[in-house]
Structure formats: C-alpha cells, structure tokens
Amino acid sequence: MRGFSPFLEYQTATSYVVIETIRELYYSVTIMKTEDRIVPQGSPAEWLPALAGGNMPRYLAFVHALENDIASGTLKPGTRLLPQRDMAAQLGLSLGTISKAYAEAEARGLISGEVGRGTFVQRRPPITTASGQTAASTNLALNVPPSTGESEVIANVLEEVLSDCALTPLLGYLPHQGLPQHRETMAKWLEQLHVVTDVDHLFITHGGQHGLSIALGMAASPNETVLTERFTYSGMIALSAMSGYRLHGVAGDMHGLLPDELDRAFSETKARVLFSTPTLQTPTGTVMPQERRQEIAEVIRRHDGILIEDDAYAFLFREPPRPISLLLPERSFYVTSFAKCLAPGLRIATMIVPEKFRDRCINAMRATGWMASPIMAEVVARLIHSGDLHRQVQLKRAEAARRDAIANEVLADWLPIVSSTPGFHRWLPIPAGRTLIALVAQAAQAGITLAPPGALQQVDRGTLGVRICLGHPATEDDLKRALLQLRRILESAEELSFV
C-alpha cells in the first residue's frame, strides 16, 4: 500500500527580510539619504507604535502594539504603514528589527505588502472562539526554527560584504556547483555531522528542496515508484505530484523504518530508490539508531537501490548520528541545509552526490537555475568562519529544548516521546474516537493553524496523526497558550458541524 503524509510546508517570510535588508544596505552606501524619505511628524498617513518596555524583543513589541491598535480600532483596515526604512528612522530602531517586525506581522495576517503601493493593514475579521471572545492566531503548521537573533547576524554580514567591496565578484555567472572556497568552507562544517567529502562531490544548491529535486531526477524516472517512510516530508509529496513519482509508504516503528518491511517493499514494488530522513524524521520525529541504519544500508545494497538522505536536523544533536550515506557513498545522495540552523530565506543547502552522477548533476544545476545565490553562499561561509553559525546552532538547540519541554508539560498525555534530543516538531497521534479533519477544524476555530489533512493512503489507519510545529510562535508564552488551547480541544468532545 502506498502512503504519504497530509502535511504541508509553507514558505517563510525570511526571504523577504533578507532581500529588504540587502536593498536598504545598498541605499545606505549610495547617495540616497534617510532624512529625505522620512514622513514628517503629524502626517495623516503616519502611524507609530507605542512600544512596551521590559525584556520583550523590540520587533515583538512592535507587533504587539500593532495588534492592540488594530483590535482597538486605532488602526483601520486599509491603513498604509510607513515604509520600513522610514519607520526605523522614526522609532530609532535598526532596519533589521523593523524588517523582522513587518515580516512577523505579515505572517500573522495583520498586514500585507503590495508591490509598488506599500504595506497595508489587512482587511479581515478577527478570529473568535466559540464563546465569542477574540482569539490570537497561532501557526503550528509552519515548521520553521524559532528566532534567535539570526536576522541581525545576517544583516551584519551583508553589511560586511558591502563594506569589503566583495559584492561585485559575486554578481556574475559563477560555477554551477558553487565557488570552490564556499564549498571548502561548507565541507569543513559538515565534518561535525560526521560527513567527510571532497569539494568535487559537494554541490551548493538553492535550498534543500532544490537538492532533493535534483537527486530524485537523477535516481528515478517519472511514473517510477519511490519508497519513503509511511508518513513523509511534504516536499517529497510536491515533487511526486509534479513529476509523477509514485510514493510507496514503508512501515516503521519508534526507531524509523523497519528493515524487513523495506526489504519486502523493494521486492514487491521493484522500486530502485528510497527517500528517508533517519534523524528527527518529519513528521513523526523518530531517530534511527546506528544498528538500524546498518541494517537499512544492507537492504538497500542487496536490492541495488539508491538512497536519498535528508539530514536537515542533525545539527540539533551534540553528537549527531552518523548518516546512512556514509555506509553507501557510491549509491547515496546526502542533502542538508542551513534553513533550520540559520534561516529558510537564505535558500542555501549542500548536496553530496555519488561519482557516477556528478557530471549529470552539474548539468542539472545549470538547467534548474545555473547556480545557487553566491551572495547567500558568501553569507553562510562568513558565518562559519566567524563562529556565528556555531553560536546560532547553540541558541537553536537551547530554544528547541525549552519549547519541547513546554510541549511535554502541556501535552504529556498525547505526545509520544521518540527522541531524547529536542527538535522543532512533534507527532500527535489522533486519539481514539476522534478524526483528523475535526481536530484541524476545531483548532482553526480556536485560532490555531494545524497542517490540514489532504489526500491520504495509509498502511494503518490507527497511525493517523498531525505534526505540531513548535518553532513558529513568536514567544514561548505564545506557544504555551496555543498548546493549552489544543489540550482543551483534545479533552473535550469532538465537534464538527457543517451548516
């Protein structure tokens, strides 16, 4: 039986922040002057927030002030906000802080940007609970890392690139695999994940999804069967829908794929390719122990198969598990990205390819974008050299631990613990007597966004569940409030009515 997940991945606003930062930094070193763009005090179109004090990050204080003024009617739908640079100048804050505030407000549905016109307060009714009270909207469907100050760090590096006059050499048509110095730096970074490779087989791709797309195009043909975990990454579902791959879900347990089930699936489907996330698998969060990885590698080799390994979460481990790819370097594509340890909007990832596919992968890079952005690759390389990436990893691990502890505290009776290392998502099996669609609907009525169910063919209906993403809520308090509301839903009778 074929099985694939109903889970959807959403794009983050981080790319908007990075692009806006580049543009504004460019203005700062040219003849354009900030003073010429400031809206005069007292202008009818001008709104400035009353920022709360305390330890709250300034960008969140901005968003909360915006929410309060919209709720009180001070800000009407359709009101145009100041441009980001002007708002930063008026408030005496950095552009990065205001860019982050606008991105967070847009993610919450408070404002929307219109190209060529500006940023406006959204025209939408507030979400209300069953009792008629206004509910704050919290997104538990978007699997992004929690903010740990990465936008300020990235902004500083972009400023360095400009001040060092390093931008111009990065603006041309450069090698498809990425610049050798960038690949050398990233290869060195991968060593702490127990991944050793030479730069000839390392590609810098336009995000992990781009790497997976190229790998799948090398290993499988349209209409071929591709084996996955029973519930799999939504990006793989998108690739199968676009290119016609047939996904076949393989049964697993709390330690990931079952070797006997994988052996049977290879034999019955005649598939040649396995896509797997052995470490903090999404959506279920399982971590495959080393002995199981060895068994899986033996099954793949016995069937002359090819492995595509997604290792996006290995950085969260102080001692990362060794990838299956190390056991099968001649038949494995290994993909990891800098989305979860830095920011998704950088769109920078690395892919290690087997020798026999290298030349074809170079052509695939050319055909699908020529190269990943050298500017963003330069940012990542500089963050590795400076140690800022390592510091961000430490902060992300600590924040993941705090948020995971909140999830355990609030939803202890519903969330199975499958890993001792905290991640950014947890698996919530649907309790007996409940339905997935009703849970998603009730959560939406309470202002909580869960990944909605889609077309699903499952091996075992009793394993249905939903991924709870812990990273998107702006603060730990926001996360706890949302999880408490979700617990109240789980404790209550199921409600689903269509009228």
Image (cartoon, rainbow, N blue to C red):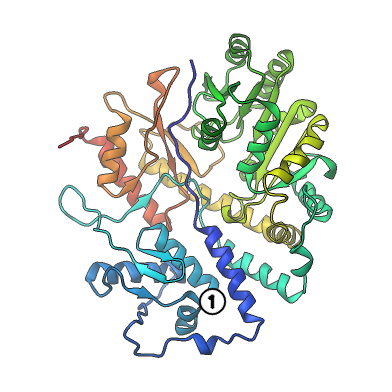
Answer whether residue 194 is visible to the viewer in this image.
Answer: no
Left or right side of 467 for 307 = right
Compare residues 473 and 255 and report the one nearer the observer.
473
Look at 58% across and 64% down and name the residue there: 18
Look at 54% across and 20% down and name the residue there: 248
x and y percentages locating residue 85 in the rendered image = 51, 78
Question: In the rendered structure, which amino acid carries the disc numbered 1?
Answer: Ser
x and y percentages locating residue 296 in the rendered image = 67, 20
Indicate the quadrant where residue 263 lies.
Answer: top right
Left or right side of 20 for 487 = left
Look at 51% across and 45% down and name the residue there: 424
Q: Secondary structure at mark 1?
A: loop
x and y percentages locating residue 204 in the rendered image = 73, 48
x and y percentages locating residue 372 in the rendered image = 70, 52
Left or right side of 422 for 163 = right
Indicate the quadrant where residue 26 lies.
Answer: bottom right
Label 1, residues with CA under 10 Å away: few <14, some 14-19, many ≥20: some
Q: How many marks?
A: 1
Is residue 243 depicted above or below 377 in this figure? above
Q: Which residue is mark 1?
A: 94
Answer whether residue 219 is visible to the viewer in this image.
Answer: yes
Indicate the quadrant where residue 429 lies.
Answer: top left
Compare residues 198 and 395 and report the one nearer the observer.
198
Look at 41% across and 73% down and name the residue there: 54
Location of the C terminus by quadrant is top left
